[in-house]
Image: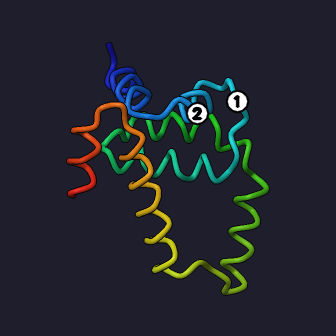
């Protein structure tokens, strides 16, 4: 089994059912889901799977990426503090929903 396959299996196991449905293409993924799931996969050390998520879904969000690029060029951006708060919320929610409660508690401590 390749590394990306092991990572996919592990990440899907740790995700809540709704996220598995998104990642498996059974439900339509929104840009916010894409952003959150690629961030979490990378954060947890599943770099190969994060890249797989990116390669599979990024083309669906070309308009969103273009809008972000335009906003950056115009000097509009989310503050670092807001981004950190959002990412901390993603981590907290992920930990609460993890089927392996010990894993979720350990991740929250980090």
Q: Distance from label 2 to label 1 (Cα)?
A: 8 Å
Instruction: Name the residue rendered at 70%, 46% in the picture.
Output: 30
Residue at 35% x, 51% y is: 43
Q: Quadrant of the N terminus?
A: top left
57 relative to 84, above or below: above
Q: Which residue is label 2 attached to?
A: 18
Give above or below for 33 relative to 87.
above
Secondary structure found at label 1: loop
| Secondary structure type for disc 2 | helix
Looking at the picture, how far across and down is residue 54, in whole percent?
56, 41
User: In this view of the protein, which residue sits in the foreground, 25 or 63?
Assistant: 25
Q: In this view, does 80 lie above or below 58?
A: below
Please report contact status of discs 2 and 1: CB closer than 8 Å, yes or no.
yes
The dot on residue 27 is 1
Colour option used: rainbow
Q: At which x and y percent is residue 24?
A: 59, 24
């Amino acid at each position: 089994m390749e590394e990306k396959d092991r990572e996919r299996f592990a990440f899907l196991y740790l995700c809540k059912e709704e996220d598995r449905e998104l990642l498996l293409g059974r439900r339509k993924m929104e840009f916010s889901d894409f952003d959150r799931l690629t961030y979490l996969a990378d954060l947890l050390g599943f770099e190969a799977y994060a890249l797989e998520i990116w390669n599979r879904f990024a083309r669906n969000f070309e308009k969103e990426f273009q809008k972000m690029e335009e906003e950056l060029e115009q000097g509009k951006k989310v503050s670092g503090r807001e981004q950190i708060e959002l990412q901390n919320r993603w981590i907290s929610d992920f930990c609460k929903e993890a089927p392996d409660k010990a894993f979720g508690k350990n991740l929250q401590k980090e």
